Structures are given as structure tokens and as C-alpha cells.
Amino acid sequence: MKSRLLKIARLPAMLDEQLHARYEVVEAGEDGSGLSAATDDIRAMVANGESRVSRELIGRLPALQLIVVFGVGYDGVDVQAARERGIQVTHTPDVLTDDVADLAITLLLGIARNTRQADQFARSGAWANGPFPFSRKVSGARLGIIGLGRIGAAIARRAAGFEMSVAYTGRRPQAVDYRYYPSALELAAAVDFLVVAVGGGASTFHLVDAQVLEALGPEGYLINVGRGSVVDEAALADALAHRRLAGAALDVFENEPHPHPGLLALDNVLLAPHMASATWSTRRAMSDLVLANLQAWADGKPLPTPVPE
């Protein structure tokens, strides 16, 4: 008889098929909504980076022992509530680092060189009337990174190929050659391109606010591949609309899948649908890691990728 597993996430078909083959999968909304009362025998849950695993939801699952997050970010999980119950929490770090860093550089280049507008310019026939307007040089520019973790460090390594100078901010200075700034505000004032590569949660909520955007200034660019909640989207839309910021490129949003309406009509913003890790190879590796964590838990072995203490 298959054990029951709660799934509160949209997952790739390749992973869904494996889960249904191995478990009796109970599905609910990303916050547990729609979950029936028959939860006493559910011992494992699969979520993703957008799921909301609250203390209340955890309390409704008396037999729960494991929460597996398909994604590197787990700020939607009340880890403290889980640990109070002895529930283990895992995620899928490392395997998506390259893809996210690649897209960060893609977005940076795209917004600086106006590739979206250039594509339309070439398609529309406007080119016949004259050349495309000049854009912003990237090589040799100053890059600031909020969050020099696995992904932030990978972005910095890629930036070296463009001879960019790199600076960063985070909880504490690291043993790296990049310049450290103690706050996002100070970092923004010192760079041309500001990349958000930090996770969500209360400690980073609206870390990039109107003041930080003002410091980045009318020739500065913001790129976000971290969490949508880190950026005050209303303030960003206002700064872009009034040209107090040169441009922004975003893969994540405060209210996914709905970007702030003030962003949609602007020509100085590049939007992507939270696709940074969405390559076949990486989603396959993430799926394999979810299954490996579930199997290790079932076998009573150490979990491959528990969330940090």
C-alpha cells in the first residue's frame, strides 16, 4: 500500500509522474487550501519556492515528518514551527545556481542593450527609416550584488568576463576580493547595475525601497533574480515611469504571476516569468534531488540537502 504524500506545488511532469508512481498523492493549493480533513496519516509534503507552509498548515498534519521544497528558496516555510515538531525540511540548492546566474546576466545585458526593443525594431520595418537608438555599454561597468551566496557568487564570476568591478552587501563581509558595503543603500549609490540575489522573508522585505532606487539613480539599472518581496514594486514602477531609474529587469515579482500593473506599459523594464532555473537539465536535477530526499527519509538515512540550521 502506498503511503500518502501531500503536494502543494506546481511541479514538472517528470517529477509528478514519479511521485504518483511511488505515493498516493494528495493535492492542495500552494497554501494548503482545499485540503480535506483526512490528513492524520500524511507524513511527507512536497512544496516549492512559492508555497506557503504556515504554522497553521503544519498543525493540521499531526503525522508530518518531512517537508521537501522543490527550489532553493524556502522562505514560505515556517521552519521554526517545523523544527519545534521535529519535522525535517529540505530544498534543492546548488543544482540551479548556474541557470539562475546565467539568466541574471542575460537580463542585465537585455535591459542595458535594449534587446526587446531591438527585436521589435528589426521586425517592424522601422530599421528602414534609420538606425536603432544607442544603448548602454556593460563591459567595465560597476556591478553590485545583494546577497553573495551561491548564486550571487556565480553572478560575480560571470561578471568578471565582462571586466566589471564587483561589490556586494550581505549579513557580513566574506573572504573575497570584492568590496563590501554594509547596506543596500550604500551599495546602490556606488554601482551602475544592482542585482538582487537574496532570498525572501521578513529580514529582506522591501530591502530595495524608494531610497535605494533613488541612490541607484537615473543612470542605474536593477535586476532581480532573488525574490519578488525584496523589491518594493510600486516604488520601482514609479521610479521607472519618472526616469529616476534607467531600467529594470525582473524574473520575480511580489504577487506572482501578476507583475505590478504600473510596470506593464513601460519601455524601460524587461520582464521574465520566473524562469531562471527553468531548463530541462536543471529541473531534472531538482526533481532527482526531491526524490533523493524523500528516499533517504524513508530509509532512515541522512538527508542529502537539509535547509541550514
Image (cartoon, rainbow, N blue to C red):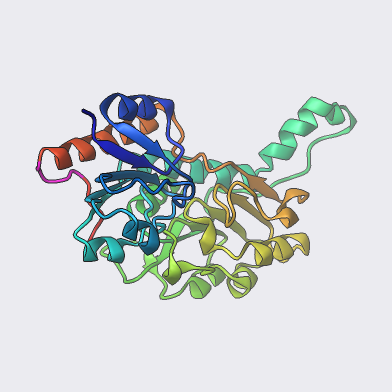
Q: Closer to the camera, 149 or 283? A: 283
Residue 195 horizontal/vertical position (percent) = 50, 56
Q: Quadrant of the C terminus?
A: bottom left
Q: Hey, which residue is sitting farthest front in the picture?
A: 37
In-front residue for pair 9/285: 9
Question: Measuring 24% from the left and 49% from the top, which residue is drawn there?
Answer: 66
**Image quarter in which the N terminus is found:** top left
How many numbered marks have been drawn onto this rendered protein structure? 0
Please provide the residue range marked out in magenta: 300-304
Residue at 39% x, 54% y: name it. Answer: 152
Can you tell which quarter of the image residue 77 is in? bottom left
Residue at the spot 54% in from the left edge and 50% down from the top edge: 252
Image height check: is 132 above or below 32? above
Q: Is residue 79 magenta?
A: no
Observer able to see residue 151: yes
Q: Nearer the viewer, residue 68 or 60?
A: 60
Q: Is residue 37 above or below residue 214?
A: above
Q: Position of residue 297 (x, y in %)?
A: 16, 42
Q: What secondary structure is the stretch in magenta mostly built from?
A: loop
Is there any visible trace of residue 142 in the rendered image? no
Residue 37 image offset from top left, x and y in percent: 39, 49
Residue 100 location, x and y as percent? 44, 43
Q: Quadrant of residue 294?
A: top left
Q: Which residue: 33% across, 27% down?
A: 20
Looking at the picture, tell me which residue is in the foreground, 63 or 168: 63
Q: Farthest residue in the left direction? A: 300
